């Protein structure tokens, strides 16, 4: 028996790579699956987020060990999610709100976020994301055309590579951590939010962190992240790229992976230069700002979106979704109102 697939739609291509033998014992590896978002025309001065939700086309469960994303020139960021069955399929990019469904694991969890023109996520030996047969995948593109006159094209592809079941040891997952307390007056020089201390949930004690990426919008000039055993311990810097680029932030890989200390957490800073002539706060648009980083880890304790805030409540709060269900629902409502 041999496995091959190809599915085409108006703005979707899903294709398996080289035909490979399929055995009753499981997945022998070697398959690749190509997903395409767009292309679509982006009028001058347009910013938008659009999503597609499509079937991968895999007949059996697969262990994804590597992902390669390729982005067109108008992309701000591109997210590949695995989505639970029950989501509505849509092979045409439609307006959607970014990130919000990450707060609810029943809706979906990120596999990879990319802001670079070309980027590979290669997981450690024996580590993979498990995708179920005929897995639903959502492709989310946030794009911007800054040109006042020219129409540009937005497009992206994501290729997922499977490893043999026999090599699989650990399930990978995703952490997204940030601070929304951004209030930047227009002024000369650099402004920094932080250091922000975030204690991770105890379920992540001993987690192996193997890659980290920082995230701001266009005023951002730096993101740095340290891992520490306590708030009082300076810990060790794990993300400190030289010449941080907000539009194509570097992903720093750690080999061997970093081990999260018991009762430990992350300390992070974000810096900006606001020369816009107006005050800038937190928001999803590239005209607003963000202070986040994401990390890939194993063994999985679920995908988590975590926030520290001192601006929106009477006392400081640390939230990890979906663990804090009530507060996560309030955060989702807040994001929907942005």
Image (cartoon, rainbow, N blue to C red):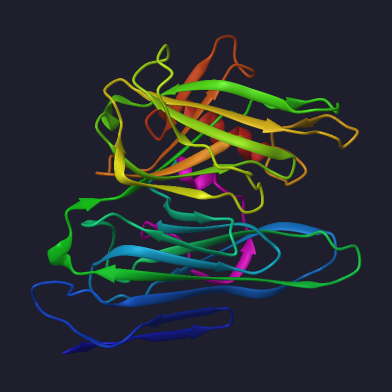
Residue drawn where x is 71% and y is 57% of the image: 48
Residue most toward the front? Answer: 242
Looking at the image, residue 2 lies above or below residue 134? below
Q: Does the segment drawn in magenta span residue 89?
A: yes
Magenta region: which residues? 83-103
Quarter of the view holding residue 331 = top right
Q: Position of residue 90 (x, y in %)?
A: 53, 69
Residue drawn where x is 30% and y is 75% of the image: 58
Residue drawn where x is 58% and y is 78% of the image: 11
Assign the N terminus to one quadrant of the image: bottom left
Q: Position of residue 153 (x, y in %)?
A: 72, 73
Q: Name the side, left or right, on which 210 lies relative to 291.
A: left
Quarter of the view holding residue 206 = top left
Q: Name the side, left or right, on which 81 lies relative to 192.
A: left
Closest to the observer, 51 or 166 = 166
Assign the C terminus to one quadrant of the image: top right
Looking at the image, residue 58 lies above or below residue 4? above
Residue drawn where x is 34% and y is 26% of the image: 201
Closest to the observer, 242 or 298 = 242
Looking at the image, residue 190 lies above or below residue 168? above
């Amino acid at each position: 028996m041999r496995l091959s697939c190809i599915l085409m739609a108006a703005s979707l291509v899903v294709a398996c790579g080289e035909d490979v033998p399929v055995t009753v014992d499981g997945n022998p590896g070697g398959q690749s699956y190509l997903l395409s978002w767009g292309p679509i025309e982006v009028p001058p001065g347009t910013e938008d987020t659009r999503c597609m939700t499509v079937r991968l086309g895999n007949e059996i469960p697969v262990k994804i060990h590597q992902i390669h994303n390729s982005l067109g020139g108008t992309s701000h960021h591109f997210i590949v999610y695995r989505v639970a069955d029950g989501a509505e399929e849509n092979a045409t990019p439609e307006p959607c709100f970014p990130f919000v469904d990450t707060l609810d694991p029943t809706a979906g969890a990120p596999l990879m976020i990319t802001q670079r023109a070309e980027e590979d996520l290669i997981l450690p030996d024996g580590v993979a994301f498990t995708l179920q047969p005929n897995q639903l995948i959502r492709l989310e593109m946030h794009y911007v055309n800054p040109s006042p006159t020219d129409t540009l094209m937005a497009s992206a592809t994501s290729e997922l590579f499977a490893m043999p079941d026999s090599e699989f040891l650990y399930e990978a997952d995703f952490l997204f951590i940030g601070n929304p307390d951004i209030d930047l007056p227009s002024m000369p020089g650099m402004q920094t939010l932080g250091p922000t201390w975030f204690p991770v949930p105890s379920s992540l004690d001993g987690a192996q962190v193997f890659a980290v990426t920082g995230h701001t919008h266009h005023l951002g000039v730096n993101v740095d992240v340290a891992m520490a055993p306590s708030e009082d311990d300076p810990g060790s810097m794990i993300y400190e790229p030289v010449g941080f680029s907000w539009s194509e932030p570097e992903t720093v890989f750690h080999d061997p992976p970093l081990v999260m200390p018991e009762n430990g957490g992350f300390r992070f800073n974000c810096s900006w230069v606001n020369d816009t002539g107006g005050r800038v706060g937190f928001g999803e648009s590239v005209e607003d700002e963000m202070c986040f980083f994401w990390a890939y880890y194993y063994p999985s304790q679920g995908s988590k979106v975590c926030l520290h805030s001192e601006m929106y409540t009477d006392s400081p709060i640390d939230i990890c979704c979906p663990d804090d269900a009530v507060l996560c629902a309030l955060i989702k409502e807040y994001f929907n109102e942005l």
